[in-house]
Amino acid sequence: MFDLIKFELKRIKSSPLSYVVLALPLLIGIVSGAAGVFYQSSAMDLFTVDMISKESLARMSTWTALTGFYSVFPIMGALYVTLFVGNDMSSGFLRNKMIAGHKRSDIFFSYVITQTAVALVEVVICISAALIVLAVNRVQLDFAGGMMFVRLLVPVFAYISMIFLYTAFTLCVRRRALPIVLCAVFAFSLSTAGLISSLGNYSSSDLNKYLSIGERAKADIDPYLKNTAPVQPDYTADPDAYADYEYVDDLDFYYDQLLTPNKPFYYVARVLYIVTDAGIPNDYRMSLLDTSYTEELQTSLSSYVNMEDSFLMSFADISELSSKIDGYRGELKEVDVTVKYTTLNLVYIIKTLLWSCVWIAGGFLIFRRKNIF
């Protein structure tokens, strides 16, 4: 197999397509580094000037620059692997290797190893270019004592797992166009999968707690909205129209955020989040900012409660309701699950390792029995 690996590497070096594939990471790295610079320079004014906020912002800027490859490389890798390996399948070159006496296992793993090597070179070029851009612009960086590079291994490993999938699938399908289309569709679907899975990042117990608080708050507040007339002169002219247009619609919007996703959709998103790597971008963003997914629900419910409280100030005596609203605020603060990067690393490495084993083992089992002739 060693001779096959050397042979494949020579072919890759002599292929014009390989130079294009290695040039793109340089461009992507420059763009990622520029995005990191822009992220910090433009967002700094939005944060309170204190050490914690600046530290979090510096980490996010660094992370944005270093992981820019993860949003583009899956698509680029899908096209390159399926074109390079698929050409060997359709042209009969792979069949000639078998006629020459090479084992199927050697052929299969030589492709996997060499395509993985190309992917790693792409990542190194991209990250190096991003770091150079960051250094030239002298932006404030934070590598979290070197832990940033440990975090970085997770998206790198996830990308390599995709290369395993592309290579194995291409070797298992004789038609050249089918792997190109399906692998490209898979790569393009990653962003959608990440968006859907982000709706299942919080646990069912956290979701139920927020729904419970929201339902109790709505049940307490609704009677005041329906049965009590506003007392401030500004609203007496047409209180119903004001409530319909200026307020109730906003309240419905905030409250609906608590009911989204609905339970069936939530469980679909939850399963997708648990069994795939689609949550990597959002999970690590939350971890670096030292916040939690439940904060999104907390923000919606807090906005709902705050709007109710401020609007009801124009109504009659609400002292009893105000104490209940304060209680809801207290309950909101207690529901907080911070995402720890050590746990994330372990979880995603295990998931990626399992999927890698599935791609390689499944692909090899099919390839070794496939009729190449």
Image (tube, rainbow, N blue to C red):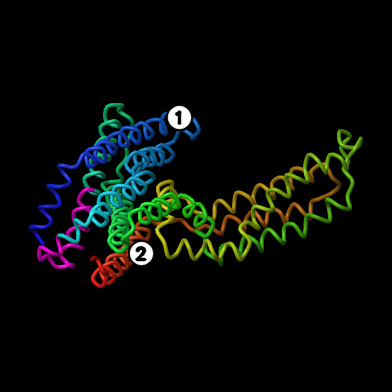
Quarter of the image where one finds residue 206: bottom right
Q: Tell me the element at label 1.
A: helix
Residue occupying the far right of the picture: 237
**Could you say which is closer to the camera, residue 340 or residue 28?**
28
Q: Tell me the element at label 2.
A: helix
Q: Position of residue 226 (x, y in %)?
A: 86, 52
Q: Is residue 116 magenta?
A: yes
In the rendered structure, which amino acid carries the disc numbered 2?
Lys
- Lateral position of residue 257 relative to residue 169, left or right: right
Q: Position of residue 133 (x, y in %)?
A: 29, 30
- Lateral position of residue 194 relative to residue 119, left or right: right
Q: What's the residue at 18%, 67% (across, down)? A: 104
From this view, report whether residue 239 is shown above or below residue 167: above
Please, what is the dominant secondary structure of the magenta stretch?
A: helix
Q: What's the residue at 79%, 43% (across, down)? A: 313
Q: Position of residue 183 (x, y in %)?
A: 38, 54
Q: Residues within 10 Å of mark 2 (few under 14, many from 20)?
A: some
Magenta stretch bounds: 97-118
Residue occupying the far top of the picture: 137
Mark 2 lies on residue: 351
Q: Residues within 10 Å of mark 1 (few under 14, many from 20)?
A: few
Quarter of the image where one finds residue 97: bottom left
Quarter containing the C terminus: bottom left
Q: Is residue 349 magenta?
A: no
